[in-house]
Amino acid sequence: MSISPTRVDDYCSATGLSLADVRKCLPEDITEHHPFRAWRALVRALLLLAIGPLCLTQLQFTQGADLLWQVPAHIACWVLTGFALVGLFTIGHDAGHEAFSKSHAVNNVVGHLCMFPLVNSYAVWVITHDHHHAHTQLRGHEVDWAAHLQTREELAQTSWKENPILRLGYAIPFGVFFWILWNTVRRSASVSVFLPERQYQNEKLRLAFSNAFMILGAVLIYGGLLWVGGLWTMVKYYGMAAFVATWVGALVVTLQHANQDTLYFDKQSWTPIRGQMVSTFDIRFSRILSWMWCHIDIHIPHHIAPRIPWYRLPEARLAILKAHPDLYQERRFRFRDLAWMLRTPTLERNEARRVWQLSKN
């Protein structure tokens, strides 16, 4: 990657560039809602979501040579449905940022409907995701996988008994992804730590409703399929697709803030520009995937101004790229870029920059 976080950080420090300065290059109407485009995207996502299961109704596994086309056909349907779920989740993501509609009530309804198919509590997700935006790459505060990263000295002082989750993430291949899945559970179980006590008490009813809706969704989808056709029906028509969506989402979320050159900050050195511009990347996928996923791969503008609707992100990207071409960290997805995750790296302190970096495995 020709543009590195250290290069962006040097420029921002030298020029005093702020997040407000970057926002000035965006069109004034960039956060305006276009109801037709928003609802059309929701309908499109639901139609795409229906194609895979409909095709699966015509597919069965039989013995013999037919398996040579039946297995790939099943996999294609699962991948298609999983990708459609990612797009549906992105629309719920927009609703969580009040970017789907001007109406808070509409955003709330759409958000719940888009999140529950992946067994995600909408209210919990909104609270913890807002925390991520407010503390991006801030060590000790970030809610995602990076919250578990340790220095070698810290890791040596941590026992399996004290923190098995942390140790397991370092012990198993691609432990970063294990942490992502664990954090999905952790967020729901400890959402109170992300809110002041008074706000948490005010949010209790909304959290309870959202959790109940999530459980209801899981019962209806998984329980319903299990009741209708048994375990294989549940796996065939939804379980495999949900598995694909979960891992694709985990991959995209990880790469948008992580590579071998990523910087992490402590409370004394963190600034909004360091969190949202220095530590955020566009990891671009093919046009068809970007379309299916509602441009979730265009991530820098989203961290600059979270209320930009997904369909305005390409426009916002071009505006930032034109104004700050040497600061826009964008690259194409390549499987070889995942190599550093095979063995979870430790952190090391760069005293000259007052930042933390991944040590080289």
Image (tube, helix red, strand yellow):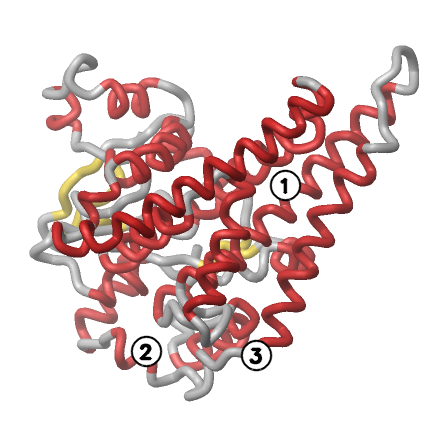
Asked whether 309 or 213 is in front, the reply is 213
Residue 292 position in % (x across, y down): 65, 56
178 and 211: which one is in front?
Answer: 211
- Tell me the tag on residue 34: 3
Which residue is drawn at the image coordinates 35% and 30% (left, top)? 182
Amino acid of disc 2:
Val
Q: Tell me the CA gap for discs 3 and 2.
A: 24 Å
Mark pair 1, 3: CA separation? 27 Å
Tag 1 and tag 3, C-beta contact below 8 Å: no
Residue on which the image places disc 1: 82
Vertical order, 246 against 352 (above or below): above
x and y percentages locating residue 80 in the rendered image? 70, 43
Quarter of the image with the N terminus is bottom left
Q: Residues within 10 Å of mark 2 (few under 14, many from 20)?
A: some
Taking 247 as reference, is 288 left or right? right
**Circle 1 sits in a helix, a strand or a loop, which is it?**
helix
Task: Say what amino acid the circle numbered 3 marks.
Answer: His
Coordinates of residue 116 in the picture (x, y in percent): 51, 44
Determine the secondary structure under disc 3.
loop
